[in-house]
Amino acid sequence: MAKPQKRYVCQSCGSVSHRWAGQCADCNEWNTLVEEAGAVVTPFAAKHNLQGGGRALSLVGLDAEVALPERMATGIAELDRALGGGLVEGSATLIGGDPGIGKSTLLLQAAARLALAGRGVAYVSGEEAADQVRLRARRLGLGAAPVRLAAATSVRDILTTLGQGRPPALLVIDSIQTMHSDLIEGAPGTVSQVRASAQELIRFAKERGTALVLVGHVTKDGAIAGPRVLEHMVDTVLSFEGERSHQYRILRAIKNRFGGTDEIGVFSMETGGLSEVANPSALFLTHRDEGVTGATVFPALEGTRPVLVEIQALVVRLASGATPRRAVVGWDSGRLAMILAVLEARCGLSFSSAEVYLNIAGGYRVQDPAADLAVAAALVSALSERPVPADAVAFGEVALSGEVRPVAHGALRLKEAGKLGFERALVPAAMTRDDGGLRLTGFRTLGALVDHMLGRG
């Protein structure tokens, strides 16, 4: 009989090596290789025998009839929006976020609402005692919800308990890094344990039609802790984002096999738990009665939802010889350097002797390239001390040549701006249609925007 082969698994990225090393060759992390029992080595001839052992598969065509999956509404509209309409029976969802961001609170609220609606719900906590979860539920006003609660970390015990009688419609595991499977060696939280525990729970969910929600810890870089394969195993990956010092929270869909990605749900953290935000733009806009230099409103797009945010810029002239700083909060610092270079090379403006600070109000993070024109307008306004009109929004992508290029879903952005009372828009010249009732001012080049703001023509 062949002997088990030793292997070393990286606890950061999950890569496997047959010898120990101080540094992982794949992710370059140090001291992350841990010895695990390997599988029995199978002879090559037996491993690749194509004549026996398997069963014939039933192949179907692409034109076969497929029924759309039924959705189970959680009763929280913003959560359902991020999920694509609600939970799907037999699906596995992974939700990650920083500690204390509100993952457990959100899932407890969703579990309680489903239980009050007559659905069977099981909530298993591996981090807190049952009494701690009960106290949180009472604090949220959900103490009377018929949620079946347990504090456990053994996957075998959990599945044995749930296998008795009717399976729940929803199973919440908080968190997957605390679960332990006795089918494999290793401490809870290691790559092998997270993978094995998730595989057993997902198999149960698929076989019994239970919607499974796994809570995942995140690393200091914001990635979900554990093996990357965990995100491939589940059907949906949600990221719960936000700064603990700010009131708002954003639930973002990163992967969704049953719906679209890049949808977001917006919540506000209050004393009674997480409340839905019907108008997210109100969170990120500063109320100002008179014009302020260096401030521009940008209609960002998250999935199919436009969100208006305020971009703030500050330019401070320095004495000759001093090294200027470039500080960015909520935007890509490399893209700011590109916009500054285009303004200097194509528009004749000088920022080389000035410190530049850029901030997205409210702690919001913008990744949309359509923000280029709004950032440029804020920088020109701060440099010239001429405010952008308070009733105007700006969006458009800026090329290295200085050309202002059109962006997707311009009509949606303008419609949202019109609903919130804005009357003008600074847009690419290629945009001629307006469905929001705004007065459009188009620019072919960034230089044309600078001339317009400085009153040159």
Image (cartoon, rainbow, N blue to C red):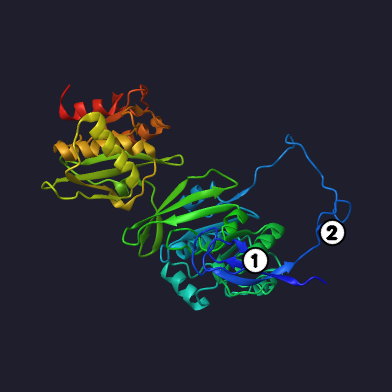
Q: Nearer the viewer, residue 304 or 164?
A: 304
The residue sitting at 30% across, 42% down in the picture is: 336
- Disc 2 versus disc 1: nearer the observer: 1
Q: Nearer the viewer, residue 427 or 107?
A: 427
Task: Report the disc number at residue 193.
Answer: none
Q: Secondary structure at mark 2?
A: helix
Which quadrant, please, contains the N terminus?
bottom right
Three-letter code for the amino acid on which mark 2 is drawn: Ala
Q: Where 285 sits versus 116, above or below?
A: above
Task: Locate residue 170, reporting x and y percent.
Answer: 60, 61
> Which of the 4 quarters of the picture holds residue 421?
top left
Q: Nearer the viewer, residue 72 or 17?
A: 17
Task: Locate residue 48, reporting x and y percent.
Answer: 82, 54
Q: Secondary structure at mark 1?
A: loop
Q: How many marks?
A: 2
The residue sitting at 49% across, 67% down in the picture is: 30
Query: Does residue 191 appear in this view?
Result: yes
Alpha carbon distance from label 2 to label 1: 22 Å
Q: Which residue position is annotated with label 2?
A: 46
Task: Locate residue 297, reporting x and y percent.
Answer: 28, 39
Q: Which residue position is annotated with label 1?
A: 18
Three-letter code for the amino acid on which mark 1 is drawn: His
Q: Is residue 304 left or right of residue 231?
A: left
Which quadrant, please, contains the C terminus?
top left
Circle 2 Cα neighbour tier, 10 Å, few/some/many (<14 / 14–19 / ≥20): few
Task: Locate residue 79, reporting x and y percent.
Answer: 49, 52
The residue sitting at 15% across, 26% down in the picture is: 455
If you read the primary sequence from the N terminus, does the residue marked by circle 2 or circle 1 appear first? 1
The residue sitting at 50% across, 54% down in the picture is: 238
Q: Is residue 425 left or right of residue 74?
A: left
Q: Is residue 20 left or right of residue 317?
A: right
Q: Nearer the viewer, residue 409 or 25?
A: 25
